[in-house]
Image: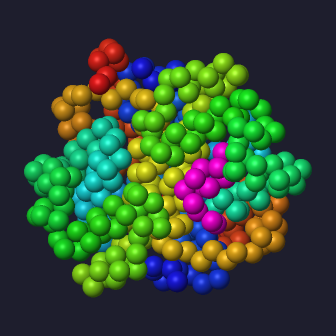
Amino acid sequence: MPHINLPEGLPGISSGFAFRPETAKPMRELAHMLLHEPNSLSPGERELIATYVSSLNDCYFCQTSHGAAAACHLGNADTVKRVKVDFSTAPVSEKLKSLLAIAGKVQLGGKHVTSEDVDAARKLGATDMEIHDTVLIAAAFCMYNRYVDGLATWQPREESMYEQMGRHLASEGYKTSSVSKREVEPVAVG
Amino acid sequence: MAHIKLPEGLQGIRGPLAFRPETARPMNELVEELLHAPNSLTGGERELIATYVSYLNDCYFCQTVHGAIAAAHLDDDEQLVKRVKADFKHADISQKLKALLVIASKVQKGGKHVTATDVEEAREVGATDMEIHDTVLISAAFCMFNRYVDGLATWQPEDEELYRQRGKKTAREGYVSMSREYIPQSQTQGA
């Protein structure tokens, strides 16, 4: 059961957003800019970074919904799984691997990022903007993940719901809600 | 030296915010709503939560500037800010704020650390659902801001007077208004 009286039938972050629209708006806009707007990193790459950080933070809702969005962009769910388990052997570019390494350091804490990490990414072609966005995506998901789990939101274990959300996120982005109210009883939360 | 080439002469978060105005705008709007907009928690109480979480995350810039903003809200009581950081359980603050600081510190470790008991204890000393929500989100948001500031190795000069003066001004004017000092106005609007 959520820690506070959140609107029922809305999974994960959607319930916090509905509870407090004033903070939802900038949080949605930030995610939209970081993950959906045109960028030299593809949306699939950026969603993989978001998914990886959410898995490090052990946030079921975020890693599953963003994993579904990443799979939708990449047309491939297996790559998402492999990035979460061990990105160093996953079928992604060397540049993305170096950015995932930076994201993993940010998840631990900002000071863990070293100039060697950044140099390694730069040598593989990462730009300052890409390094910036990687740091901010990782930092932002340290916020979103804590928000979702810190309120103990309802996070149904229902793959088809996340696949549907992933498709919506991949095509529409983050400015509007990707879920409608659900009829499922919010008691079966793990 | 910062990890990427940031605009020069801007301390802490100002460098990356000016580097990327498109993400700066929602970030400033979020912190404005959480810390400056009218709320049943005072500006001083909310800034103390932000300061405490930034201290736990060991972010010099954020804990110093938000500590200065908190002090500006609290009749310049810099000692109180220090006591909250060192040992909030014995600081001269309300039982409600102490209960909210416990929740904030759990969120800093990770969202799942917050227990129903923590929330129940806050409620027993008068915290509303909105106050508990905002405490969780302030703490979560500073886990972002702190990582952004340190993850890019921004310039963070140790100059207490600079933070003191900026703290007074931010406490008065808020974050969106202050952002016009370092981001050209045309870039903070629209989109």
Q: Residue at x 59, y 45 (%)?
A: B138
Q: In screen coordinates, is B59 left or right of B172?
A: left
Q: Is residue A110 above or below residue A2?
A: below
Q: Is B34 displayed left or right of A77 in the figure?
A: right
Which residue is at a point 57% across and 60% down the rendered structure image?
B58
Residue at 24% across / 69% down in the picture? A96
Q: Position of residue B25 (x, y in %)?
A: 56, 60
Vertical order, B29 against B40 (above or below): below
Q: Nearer the viewer, residue B49 or B25?
A: B49
**Does residue B116 sit above or below A34 in this rendering?**
above
Q: How many tags in the picture?
A: 0
Residue A126: image x %, image y %? 31, 78
Range drawn in magenta: B49-61
Does the segment drawn in magenta span residue A133? no
The majority secondary structure of the magenta stretch comes to helix
Q: Nearer the viewer, residue A132 or B25?
A: A132
Q: Quadrant of residue A11?
A: top left
The answer to whether residue B51 is magenta is yes
How are the colours assigned in the image? Answer: rainbow
- Left or right of residue A14, residue B135 in this image: right
Compared to residue B51, the image places residue A37 above or below, namely: below
Q: Nearer the viewer, residue A3 or B169?
A: A3
The picture places residue B100, in percent across and down from the top left corner, at 64, 34
Most foreground residue, B41 or B75? B75
**Which residue is pictured at 32% across the width and 37% down the height?**
A61
Find residue A72 and report its horizontal and vertical position in percent. Answer: 18, 49
Camera sees residue B190? no
> Which residue is outermost to the right?
B75
User: Do we see residue B28 in this rendering?
Assistant: yes
